[in-house]
Image (tube, rainbow, N blue to C red):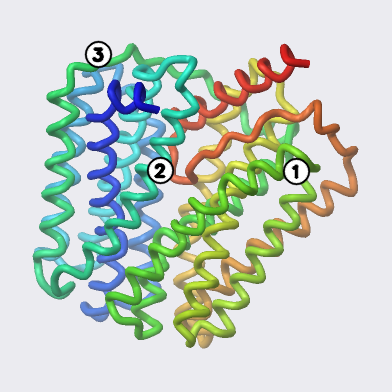
Amino acid sequence: MLQVLSSAWALLLGMGLLMIGNGMQGTLLGIRGALEDFSTFQMSIVMSCYFVGFLGGSRMAPGMIRRVGHVRVFAALASLISAVMILYPTFPNIVMWSLGRILIGFCFSAVYVTAESWLNNAATNENRGQALSLYMIVQTLGIVISQALLLTADPSGYVLFVIPSVLVSLAITPILLSISPTPAFDTTKPMSLRELLGFSPLGCVGMFLMGGIFSAQFGMASVYGAEAGLSVAQISTFVATFFVGAVMLQYPIGWISDRMDRRALVVVVSAIGAAGSAVGMLLGHQFIMLLVSAFVVGGMANPLYSLLIAHTNDFLEHEDMAAASGGMIFINGLGAILGPVITGWMMGTSLGPGGFYLFTGILFVILAFYAAYRSARGAVIPVEDKGSYVPISAAATGVALEYAQELAIEADQENENAA
């Protein structure tokens, strides 16, 4: 762990600052949108635009990096992110905010691709798993810390937009001053979606549904809070609780998944997520119960992402696992684009804020039933023949997913040698 910190501290610090900035702007827009009298559906379009840009950035970033290099891509896009954050309060209208979210989503995706490939280069075979774990911890801590910073100023003013802009600008400094060498960049040719669907129907359907759940959680939680009449402090606590649940439950669920049938575990975890959504919908007027529901939904949704990847890997040869990562990211991205729009539409009906939890609950239920259906149709894979579970953030790009796939392959090979 210390070796990873000594070789990649600048990159991890920079990514931490970027995540704080990203977490702040996402929640802040939901709060400020309510103050600007934007409708719930209008805000859902704004939030969805981030995932449009994110999907585009993840596909275009490799070409940009090959043309001009990691350093220039990172510096240019981080500067652009900083500028857009300042422009949000200057032009408070839906068109400008939507364009800004597309641009920020694109930039953050490309920055993550750059940072993740850089981190992969800085790690060794011996500490690659620790490096990925540290990266995930930094990502999640950044989002949790960002929610606390929302309490430092009035959301109707400019200060809360200036803070993330400054943090993103500062994030460039440690990375550009680092002496770590920049890596050569290459990506694996992706597997076709038809091939991927043939290998693992549950993996593909699950990744699409998880895209909707995660984007609703990341993009619309603050909009829900504003519509429900929560204070800024309550909204920031509510949003942070999703990610606290993700961190605390990721590893226990991963440990269980390596010891039982993963399709059965998908059914159980999805059912618990649906129950958490029901608690939020029925008892959300009690703030403590609202936090309980956020903890459960976040704690189930993020591990499910890693669980579905591990399940898909169970049906792939090692040489196909990296190629499959591009298709899984793309399917997840399509679900992520639709998630906020459908959530916003449901919240704009007579359901009100409860539409947020109804949407996540429906997706969890669909996933649970489909996993049960697939489990009934297929034979159970013996524990000794299963691949390894590797925790990965739902916000990760294809580079980090390929990185996680490499770790899973290494762990499988070690288990085979030990046997």
Q: Secondary structure at mark 3?
A: loop
Residue flagged by tag 2: what amino acid is it? Ile
Where's residue 139, x and y in %? 36, 44
Where's residue 72, x and y in %? 18, 24
Q: Which mark is residue 90?
A: none
**Quarter assignment of residue 319:** top right
Q: Say whether disc 3 or disc 1 marks the residue closer to the N-terminus.
A: 3
Say if 184 sits above or below 17 in the image.
above
Question: Do the CB atoms of the residues marked 2 and 3 lie less than 8 Å apart?
Answer: no
Q: Which residue is mark 2?
A: 137
Q: Say whether disc 2 or disc 3 marks the residue closer to the N-terminus.
A: 2
Q: Residues within 10 Å of mark 2 (few under 14, many from 20)?
A: some
Q: At 59% from the left edge and 42% from the top edge, which residue is drawn? A: 306
Image quadrant in which the N terminus is located: top left
Q: Which residue is mark 3?
A: 181
Q: Say whether disc 1 or disc 2 marks the residue closer to the N-terminus.
A: 2
Q: Nearer the viewer, mark 2 or mark 3?
A: 2
Where's residue 222, x and y in %? 36, 69
Q: Which residue is mark 1?
A: 262
Q: CA distance from mark 2 to mark 3?
A: 23 Å
Residue flagged by tag 1: what amino acid is it? Arg
